[in-house]
Image (cartoon, rainbow, N blue to C red):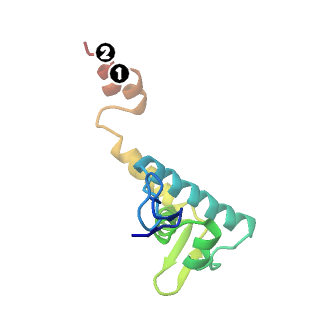
Amino acid sequence: MMYTSRFRTGSAARPAVGSTARGRVELPAGTRRWLSWHLQERIKKLIIDRRLPSGAPLRTEPLLMDYLGASRNSVREALKALRAMGIVEIRHGFGTYVGPRSLAPMIEGLAFRTVAGHYPGEDSAERGAGGVLGRARRRP
């Protein structure tokens, strides 16, 4: 039986190590996170390089896939992460747009971390010097 893959052809041909019969490469979890981060950085660079204003449409998913050389799932994962940061807006059925230039998402996150990190009767100086965190370091 003749086996054909994206990598080689011939009767003894086998897919490359770590790849599937369709030619897709399985990546370890850490590599997938790095890939998502790398795609996010490239999309942010695209926005900056093209000087896209707030509300400007980004390329469609198929065009982003070609431009970035990545799969649809990888592009979507990167866009969802950028949406969570408020960098892009995803309007279902309409496309992806540059998000508003606002510090609101960051302010909300910082406010939450400030409240969640505050313990009654302690301030941040006590926690760092000898409070909860300082005592944890001194335990035998």
| Amino acid type of the residue tagged 1 in the rendering | Gly
Mark 2 neighbour density, 10 Å: few (under 14) some (14–19) many (20 or more) = few
Mark 1 neighbour density, 10 Å: few (under 14) some (14–19) many (20 or more) = few
Q: Which residue is located at x 34 percent, y 45 percent?
A: 116
Q: Which residue is located at x 49 percent, y 72 percent?
A: 72
Q: Nearer the viewer, residue 12 or 135?
A: 12
Which residue corresponds to mark 2?
138
How far across and how far down the image is residue 24, in percent? 46, 63
Q: Nearer the viewer, residue 58 or 125?
A: 58
Discs 2, 1 touching: Cβ within 8 Å? yes
What quarter of the picture does the N terminus occupy? bottom left
Q: CA distance from mark 2 to mark 1?
A: 7 Å
How far across and how far down the image is residue 139, in percent? 26, 16
Q: Which residue is located at x 68 percent, y 61 percent?
A: 45
| Amino acid type of the residue tagged 2 in the rendering | Arg
Which residue corresponds to mark 1?
134
Compared to residue 113, the image places residue 78 above or below, namely: below
Q: Residue furthest bottom?
A: 93
Q: Nearer the viewer, residue 112 or 15?
A: 15
Compared to residue 108, the image places residue 139 above or below, namely: above
Compared to residue 115, the image places residue 138 above or below, namely: above
Q: Dividing the picture into quarters, in which one does residue 134 lie?
A: top left
Left-right relation of 136 to 80: left
Give the total number of marks visible in the rendering.
2
What quarter of the picture does the C terminus occupy? top left
How far across and how far down the image is residue 108, in percent? 45, 57
Q: Dividing the picture into quarters, in which one does residue 114 lie?
A: top left
Q: Residue furthest left?
A: 140
Q: Secondary structure at mark 1?
A: helix
Q: Which residue is located at x 36 percent, y 47 percent?
A: 115
How far across and how far down the image is residue 26, in percent? 42, 56
